[in-house]
Image (cartoon, rainbow, N blue to C red):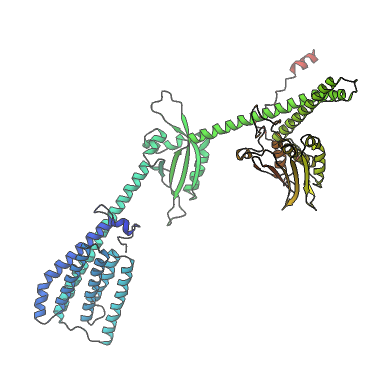
Amino acid sequence: MRSLFSFGASKESLAVAGSGHRPEMLRRKTLATNARIAIVASAILMLPAIICLVLGTALPFVIAAIGLAAGMISLAMHQRAQFEQAVAAQVYAIMAIGLILTLADGQLADAGLAVAVLGPVHASLLARNVMRRQSWVALAAICLLAFITSRFGLPAITVGVAPLMATCVLAFTVCAAIVAHSANRIGAAYEVYDRSQVTAYRHLIEHVQDAVLRFSSSGEVLLASKTSEALFGCPRYELTGSGLGERLHVLDRPSYLTAFADANQGGKTRMIEVRMRQDDPRASTRVPHFIWVEISLSPVIDPESPDQRHEVVALFRDVTERKDTEAAMTEARRVAEEASNAKSHFLATIGHELRTPLNAVVGFSEMMTTGIGGELSPTHKEYAGLIHQSGKHLLEVVRMLLDMSKIEAGKFEVQTEPFAPDTLVETCFKMVEGLARERNITLVADIANNLPVLVADERACRQVLLNLLSNAIKFSHEGGTVTVTMKRQGQSLNISVADSGIGMAPESLQRVGEPFFQANEGLSRRYEGTGLGLSIVKGLVDLHDGTLRAMSEIGAGTTMTVLLPINGPAIKTEDSAVVTPLHREPAPLQATPWQNEKRKAQ
C-alpha cells in the first residue's frame, strides 16, 4: 500500500510545503481529522457505555475511554507538531481495542482481530517505515495471543453476547471510518500530486531552451514544445504529419531516418547533426534558409513490452553558430597551411638560388686571401677576408633555411643506422673549436662509460649537437665553459649541453624551438643569428621520437637536454612525414588530334 511518504521527497522538504494541498499538509490534516472523529465518536458512545458500566458490563466503557483518550492525545500531539507520535497514538489505540475485543471473544476469527488488522493498515497509510514494521509485529503478537486463548481455553474477559456484539460493531465501524478517511485523503493527495507533476513537466517542456518533440511508436509527432516555433520559424502544428520531414535537407534525410530507426526500433539513444529549413515570415523571398540542428533521440522504453517499437523524445538544438565557427577555423587552417607551404617553397627556392653565387663568392674570396690570383695589399687582403667570412655566414644561413624548409615540408630524410654516440663529441668539438678559441671558451666533455649503440641518423645527430654547441658558445661570456654530457637514461640517450652564459627568462623558455625566435630580439640585440638553430634541433629530435628540454636562469647559464630513444624512432618511413595534398589541380585536358589527322589525310 502506498503512503503519503512515497513521493520521493524528504521529511524536511515536505514539512515546509506552503500549499494546503501538498502531501505533507494533507497528512497533517488527516491526522487532525482522525483525532476529531475518534473524540466525537467516543464521546457519543460514552453515555451508553456508562449505562452498561452501571449494569455491570465494563467492556463498552473501556473501549470508549481508549478511543476518547487516543483522540485527545493524538490531537494534542498534532498541535505540538509531533506528528509521528500522533500517528502512533491512533495506530496503537486501534490495536489495543482489537486486542481487548479479541480477549473478550473466545473464537480465533472474531471482530476484535478484524479491528486489530486495521492498525497496520492505518500505519501503512500515514506512518513511516519504523512504525509500519512495529505495527505488523504487534499484530502478529495479537494473533498469537488469540490463538493461544482459543486453543487452550485460557481465562478471558467475560461479557454478555449482546453487549459484546454491539461493542464490536461500533468499534469496527469507527475504526474502519478512520482508516477509510485516511485512504480517501491519500487518493486525493496522489491525484493532486500527479496533476502537479504533469503541470511541472509541461512547464519544463514549454520553457526549456531546446525544442522538444515527442514521437509516437509509429513516428508521428505527438507533442511539440513552444520553443520549436522559434527554432523552425513556424507554428508548431505545421510540424505534424510530414511537416518535420520536409524540413530536413535532402542529403541529411538518410542519416536522420537511420538514427530515428535505431531509437524507435532498437531502443538506442542517438545524437546527430543535420540541416533543417528555418522559415522567416518577414522574408521577402522564398529562398530556403537552412540551419544546423543537433538532434538527441531518446527512446521511451516500456519494460513490459521491450520488443515493440518505442516512443521517442527528441531534443533539437540550433548549433549553426558552432558549425560556422568550425567552418571558419577549417578555412583559416587551410589558409595557414597554404601560407606555410608557400613560405617553405619560397625558402627552398631562394635558398637554392643563393647557394650557387655564394659558393662562388666564398671560393674566390678564399683564393684571393691565399694569394692564388696574386699578392694583395694588406688592405685588400683584409677586405677579401671580410668577404670570405660574410659569405660563409650567408651559406650557413642558407643551409639552415633549406633544412628548416625540408623539415616543415616533411622531406627531411632520416636514415637510421647503429653507431657509437660518443664519436659525435670529438667531431663537433673540432668543428667549433675555432669559434670557441675566438671567445676564449673552454670545451669540456663528460661522457659515461659503456654507452650503448644508438640507432639514429648520425648526420642529423651531429647537426643537433653542433647547433647546441654553437648556441652555447655564442651566448657564453668571455672565458666561460661549455660542457657536453652524454649518458644513458632508461631507454634513451641523454645528451646535455650546458653553458654559463646570459641565460633565458621563463617566458623565453616556453618558446624554445619556435622558428626565428631569439631571446634577445630587436634591432639592438648583441648576438647574431636567425633563430633557426634550436627550431632545427627540435625538428630533428622530433623526427627521432625524442624530447628537447631546456633549463635556464638569467645570468646563470642554460642547459639544453636532448633525449633520443636508443632503439631509434618507433616508425621509420621513407620520408620524415606523410604530406597529404590539400588541393589537386585538375588533370589537363588532352587536345583532340583531329587537326593533325586532317593534315595527314591531306
Q: Nearer the viewer, residue 131 or 226?
A: 131
Q: Quadrant of residue 402?
A: top right
Most distant residue in the front direction: 479
Looking at the image, residue 369 lies above or below residue 15 = above
Most distant residue in the top direction: 602
Residue beneath the point at 50% across and 41% down: 272
142 with respect to 239 (left or right): left
Looking at the image, residue 99 lies above or below residue 309 = below
Q: Nearer the viewer, residue 447 or 416?
A: 447
Residue beneath the point at 74% across and 17% down: 594
In the image, residue 562 lies at what x, y percent? 71, 44
Residue beneath the point at 38% across and 28% down: 281
Looking at the image, residue 72 lies above or below residue 381 = below
449 with respect to 144 (left or right): right
In the image, residue 26 lies at what x, y percent? 25, 58
Q: Is residue 417 visible?
A: yes
564 with respect to 18 (left or right): right
Q: Nearer the viewer, residue 328 or 115?
A: 328
Q: Is residue 456 visible?
A: no
Looking at the image, residue 179 lies above or below residue 580 = below
Q: Quadrant of the N terminus?
A: bottom left
Residue beneath the point at 61% across and 31% down: 334
Q: Nearer the viewer, residue 460 or 182?
A: 460
